Image (cartoon, helix red, strand yellow):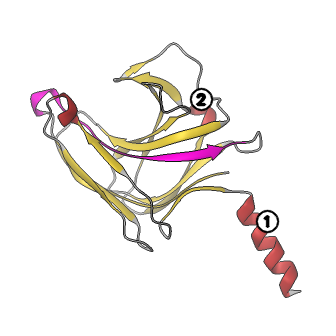
Amino acid sequence: MKWLVLICVLLNVNNEILVFDKAKQTKWYVTNDDVMGGISTSSMIHKTSENAVFSGEVSTENNGGFAMTRMRVNVKLDDKKSKIVLRVKGDGKKYQLRLKADRSTRFWYIQSFQTNGKEQEIEIPLTSFYPSFRGYRLNLDNFSSQTIKEIAILIGNKTNEKFKLEVEKISIR
Protein backbone atom coordinates (compact mmCIF):
# COMPACT_ATOMS: atom_id res chain seq x y z
CA MET A 1 0.00 0.00 0.00
CA LYS A 2 2.87 2.40 0.80
CA TRP A 3 4.29 1.85 -2.69
CA LEU A 4 0.95 2.71 -4.26
CA VAL A 5 0.83 6.00 -2.35
CA LEU A 6 4.41 6.79 -3.42
CA ILE A 7 3.60 6.03 -7.07
CA CYS A 8 0.51 8.27 -6.90
CA VAL A 9 2.56 11.09 -5.41
CA LEU A 10 5.22 10.71 -8.13
CA LEU A 11 2.58 10.75 -10.85
CA ASN A 12 1.08 13.89 -9.37
CA VAL A 13 4.49 15.58 -9.40
CA ASN A 14 5.03 14.49 -13.01
CA ASN A 15 1.79 16.23 -14.05
CA GLU A 16 3.51 19.51 -13.26
CA ILE A 17 6.52 21.10 -14.98
CA LEU A 18 8.62 22.80 -12.35
CA VAL A 19 10.02 26.09 -13.67
CA PHE A 20 11.28 27.49 -10.37
CA ASP A 21 11.32 26.09 -6.86
CA LYS A 22 12.84 27.70 -3.78
CA ALA A 23 14.82 24.53 -3.03
CA LYS A 24 16.71 24.69 -6.32
CA GLN A 25 19.39 27.34 -6.85
CA THR A 26 18.56 29.43 -9.92
CA LYS A 27 20.29 32.39 -11.56
CA TRP A 28 18.06 35.45 -11.84
CA TYR A 29 19.06 38.60 -13.76
CA VAL A 30 17.85 42.11 -12.94
CA THR A 31 16.93 44.67 -15.60
CA ASN A 32 15.70 48.04 -14.38
CA ASP A 33 14.72 51.23 -16.15
CA ASP A 34 18.32 52.48 -15.86
CA VAL A 35 18.82 50.90 -19.29
CA MET A 36 16.90 53.94 -20.59
CA GLY A 37 17.93 56.60 -18.07
CA GLY A 38 15.62 55.77 -15.16
CA ILE A 39 16.71 55.39 -11.54
CA SER A 40 14.60 52.47 -10.26
CA THR A 41 16.47 49.86 -8.23
CA SER A 42 15.78 46.21 -7.49
CA SER A 43 17.32 42.90 -6.54
CA MET A 44 16.35 39.26 -6.66
CA ILE A 45 17.81 37.40 -3.71
CA HIS A 46 17.46 33.64 -3.52
CA LYS A 47 18.97 31.50 -0.82
CA THR A 48 18.36 27.78 -1.23
CA SER A 49 15.28 26.56 0.66
CA GLU A 50 14.00 30.11 1.13
CA ASN A 51 11.62 32.02 -1.10
CA ALA A 52 13.28 34.15 -3.76
CA VAL A 53 12.69 37.82 -2.88
CA PHE A 54 12.25 40.39 -5.66
CA SER A 55 12.30 43.82 -4.01
CA GLY A 56 13.30 47.39 -4.59
CA GLU A 57 11.96 50.81 -5.42
CA VAL A 58 10.38 52.00 -8.66
CA SER A 59 10.88 55.65 -9.60
CA THR A 60 9.16 57.47 -12.44
CA GLU A 61 11.92 60.11 -12.56
CA ASN A 62 13.92 60.48 -15.78
CA ASN A 63 11.13 58.76 -17.75
CA GLY A 64 11.65 55.55 -15.77
CA GLY A 65 9.14 53.42 -13.96
CA PHE A 66 9.90 49.70 -13.97
CA ALA A 67 11.98 46.97 -12.39
CA MET A 68 12.27 43.44 -13.73
CA THR A 69 13.90 40.15 -12.82
CA ARG A 70 14.23 37.34 -15.32
CA MET A 71 15.68 33.88 -15.69
CA ARG A 72 16.50 31.63 -18.57
CA VAL A 73 14.62 28.36 -18.76
CA ASN A 74 14.20 25.54 -21.21
CA VAL A 75 10.62 24.32 -20.86
CA LYS A 76 8.99 22.04 -23.40
CA LEU A 77 5.20 22.06 -23.24
CA ASP A 78 2.68 19.51 -24.37
CA ASP A 79 -0.99 19.99 -25.22
CA LYS A 80 -2.04 18.95 -21.72
CA LYS A 81 -0.29 21.92 -20.09
CA SER A 82 -2.57 24.94 -20.13
CA LYS A 83 -1.66 27.25 -17.26
CA ILE A 84 1.24 28.71 -15.37
CA VAL A 85 0.95 28.61 -11.58
CA LEU A 86 2.70 31.03 -9.23
CA ARG A 87 3.01 30.44 -5.52
CA VAL A 88 3.89 33.87 -4.13
CA LYS A 89 3.54 36.21 -1.19
CA GLY A 90 3.12 39.76 -2.42
CA ASP A 91 2.62 43.22 -1.07
CA GLY A 92 -0.82 43.97 -2.53
CA LYS A 93 0.63 45.40 -5.74
CA LYS A 94 0.12 44.43 -9.37
CA TYR A 95 2.94 42.68 -11.25
CA GLN A 96 3.43 41.25 -14.72
CA LEU A 97 4.55 37.75 -15.53
CA ARG A 98 6.42 37.65 -18.85
CA LEU A 99 7.30 34.77 -21.15
CA LYS A 100 9.55 34.41 -24.18
CA ALA A 101 9.23 31.46 -26.54
CA ASP A 102 12.56 32.40 -28.15
CA ARG A 103 15.34 34.40 -26.48
CA SER A 104 16.12 36.22 -29.74
CA THR A 105 12.71 37.92 -29.96
CA ARG A 106 12.61 41.48 -28.67
CA PHE A 107 9.03 41.30 -27.38
CA TRP A 108 7.52 39.47 -24.42
CA TYR A 109 4.22 37.70 -23.90
CA ILE A 110 2.76 39.30 -20.79
CA GLN A 111 -0.06 38.91 -18.30
CA SER A 112 -0.68 40.88 -15.11
CA PHE A 113 -1.41 39.39 -11.71
CA GLN A 114 -2.54 41.03 -8.49
CA THR A 115 -1.07 40.17 -5.11
CA ASN A 116 -3.06 40.44 -1.89
CA GLY A 117 -0.44 40.70 0.88
CA LYS A 118 -0.81 37.02 1.80
CA GLU A 119 0.54 33.74 0.47
CA GLN A 120 -1.42 32.83 -2.61
CA GLU A 121 -1.47 30.52 -5.61
CA ILE A 122 -2.19 32.34 -8.86
CA GLU A 123 -3.18 30.44 -12.01
CA ILE A 124 -2.82 32.14 -15.40
CA PRO A 125 -3.88 30.43 -18.65
CA LEU A 126 -0.95 30.29 -21.08
CA THR A 127 -3.18 31.41 -23.94
CA SER A 128 -4.00 34.66 -22.09
CA PHE A 129 -0.41 35.95 -22.45
CA TYR A 130 -0.40 38.62 -25.15
CA PRO A 131 2.59 40.01 -27.09
CA SER A 132 3.93 43.39 -26.03
CA PHE A 133 6.99 45.51 -26.81
CA ARG A 134 7.92 48.52 -24.67
CA GLY A 135 4.42 48.82 -23.30
CA TYR A 136 2.61 48.49 -26.61
CA ARG A 137 0.43 45.52 -27.46
CA LEU A 138 1.48 43.95 -30.75
CA ASN A 139 -0.85 42.76 -33.48
CA LEU A 140 0.20 39.12 -33.10
CA ASP A 141 -1.48 36.02 -31.72
CA ASN A 142 -1.40 35.28 -28.01
CA PHE A 143 1.12 32.78 -26.65
CA SER A 144 0.82 29.38 -28.35
CA SER A 145 4.39 28.09 -28.42
CA GLN A 146 5.49 24.63 -27.30
CA THR A 147 8.56 26.11 -25.56
CA ILE A 148 9.38 28.74 -22.97
CA LYS A 149 12.97 30.01 -23.03
CA GLU A 150 12.78 32.92 -20.61
CA ILE A 151 10.48 34.01 -17.80
CA ALA A 152 10.35 37.36 -16.02
CA ILE A 153 8.52 39.29 -13.34
CA LEU A 154 8.08 43.03 -13.81
CA ILE A 155 6.59 45.82 -11.74
CA GLY A 156 5.70 49.04 -13.52
CA ASN A 157 2.54 50.62 -12.17
CA LYS A 158 3.36 54.19 -13.33
CA THR A 159 3.90 55.30 -9.74
CA ASN A 160 6.79 55.76 -7.32
CA GLU A 161 6.67 52.79 -4.96
CA LYS A 162 8.64 50.31 -2.92
CA PHE A 163 7.83 46.69 -3.60
CA LYS A 164 8.49 43.19 -2.34
CA LEU A 165 7.39 39.91 -3.90
CA GLU A 166 8.38 36.53 -2.48
CA VAL A 167 8.38 33.69 -5.01
CA GLU A 168 8.16 30.17 -3.67
CA LYS A 169 7.38 28.28 -6.86
CA ILE A 170 6.55 28.67 -10.53
CA SER A 171 5.14 25.67 -12.37
CA ILE A 172 3.13 24.72 -15.42
CA ARG A 173 0.12 22.42 -15.20
Residue occupying the point 37% across, 57% down: 90
Residue occupying the point 71% across, 65% down: 13
User: Which comes sooner in the sequence, label 1 or label 2?
Assistant: 1
Residue 74 magenta-highlighted: yes
Q: In this view, does 136 lie above or below 151?
A: above
Say whether residue 81 is left or right of residue 42.
Answer: right
Return the residue at label 2: 143
Say whether residue 59 is left or right of residue 148.
Answer: left
- x, y percent for residue 91: 32, 56
Residue occupying the point 64% across, 31% down: 145
Query: Foreground: 62 or 89?
Result: 62
Distance, label 1 to label 2, CA atoms, is: 27 Å
Q: In which quarter of the image is residue 107?
A: top left
What stretch of residues is rendered in magenta? Answer: 61-77
Return the residue at label 1: 11
> Which amino acid type is shown beneath numbered disc 2?
Phe
- x, y percent for residue 167: 43, 59
* Residue 163 visible here: no
Query: Foreground: 117 or 24?
Result: 24
Q: Quadrant of residue 18?
A: bottom right
Circle 1: is it few (<14), some (14-19), or many (20+) Cα within 10 Å? few
